[in-house]
């Protein structure tokens, strides 16, 4: 499989990561995942904008412009040739010797860029029936707005939920629902849509940006405010969103049915609108060629 390694496209076997790369030793890096539909990198600009915000928050100087990174990602996508996929790319702060906790001089240490592409398809079967989740205490750090490669807290939360037989974790901090293990979380109550406001406790999702646009068009009231686990359990509907999962209904939490225990009408309406806007973006991209 071809991968992107800094500015080169090489075979995966050719990539050599230094033992003292700060991403390997400290988790000192950031990443993004862009969904590719029919060869089109969906919401690419928003993903690149967020990468730059994450870089600024961890005081990392990126060694390329957004245009340069975009060109590299498109070269990789064309080389690999997968029409429906996800492209994962990360930037670590690079290799500094000896191993020290303080940040190295950015003039002396070059960040390392890597990207790969794997097949991906819409999870339609799960979207049609929904998934089951369990509450897990949100014990992660207080910089969840940074898309850091340090994901151990998220992984532990997901594993805790899966050990109990659930598909997903719904994270709760001080009684309030924050998000899912790697997705933004939403609930519907009395035809009103709720989600946790952006801030340091949740990741500002790219799919979340699109949902904000869609609900305005659909005439759905959106309130970005905190809600408790108790309020979620009596909600009419619940779903999570991410670039890969799109809109995924959650029909049960801690063995308690949400609403009727099936994907709700607003959830299905938003999912349909999301798929339509993806298709329109793909068609517009084709027309530009």
Image: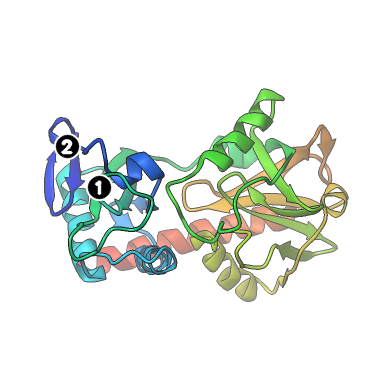
Quadrant location, the C terminus: bottom left
The quarter holding residue 198 reads bottom right
Residue at 79% over, 53% down: 174
Say the numbered circle drawn on residue 114.
1
Looking at the picture, tell me which residue is in the foreground, 221 or 26.
Answer: 26
Quadrant location, the N terminus: top left
Q: Mark 2 points at which residue?
A: 15
Residue 92, percent across and down? 31, 51
Q: How crowded is mark 1: few (under 14 residues within 10 Å), some or many (20 or more)?
A: some
Residue 48, percent across and down? 35, 65
Residue at 24% over, 56% down: 111
Say whether disc 2 or disc 1 marks the residue closer to the N-terminus.
Answer: 2
Distance from the alpha carbon under mark 2 to that under mark 1 = 9 Å
Q: How crowded is mark 2: few (under 14 residues within 10 Å), some or many (20 or more)?
A: few
CB within 8 Å, label 2 to label 1: yes
Looking at the picture, tell me which residue is in the foreground, 15 or 40.
Answer: 15
**Seen in the image, is 134 located left or right of residue 277?**
right
**Seen in the image, is 177 located left or right of residue 277?**
right
């Amino acid at each position: 499989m071809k991968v992107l390694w800094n500015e080169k496209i090489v075979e995966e076997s050719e990539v050599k990561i230094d033992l003292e790369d700060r991403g390997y030793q400290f988790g000192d890096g950031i990443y993004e995942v862009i969904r590719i539909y029919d060869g089109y990198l969906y919401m690419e600009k928003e993903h690149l904008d967020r990468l730059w915000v994450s870089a600024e928050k961890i005081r990392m100087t990126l060694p390329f412009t957004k245009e340069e990174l975009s060109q590299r990602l498109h070269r990789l996508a064309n080389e690999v040739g997968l029409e429906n996929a996800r492209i994962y790319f990360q930037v670590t702060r690079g290799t500094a010797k000896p191993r020290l906790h303080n940040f190295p001089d950015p003039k002396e240490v070059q960040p390392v860029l890597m990207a790969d592409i794997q097949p991906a398809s819409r999870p339609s079967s799960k979207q049609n029936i929904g998934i089951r989740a369990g509450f897990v205490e949100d014990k992660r750090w207080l910089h969840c707005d940074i898309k850091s490669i340090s994901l151990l807290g998220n992984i532990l939360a997901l594993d805790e939920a899966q050990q109990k037989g659930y598909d997903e974790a719904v994270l709760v901090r001080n009684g309030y629902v924050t998000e899912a293990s790697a997705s933004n979380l939403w609930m519907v109550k009395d035809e009103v849509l709720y989600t946790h406001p952006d801030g340091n406790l949740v990741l500002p999702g790219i799919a979340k940006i699109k949902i904000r646009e869609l609900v305005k068009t659909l005439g759905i009231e959106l309130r970005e405010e905190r809600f408790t686990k108790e309020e979620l359990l009596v909600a009419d509907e619940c779903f999570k969103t991410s670039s890969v999962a799109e809109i995924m209904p959650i029909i049960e939490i801690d063995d308690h049915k949400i609403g009727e225990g099936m994907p709700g009408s607003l959830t299905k309406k938003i999912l349909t609108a999301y798929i339509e806007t993806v298709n329109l973006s793909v068609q517009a991209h084709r027309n530009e060629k």
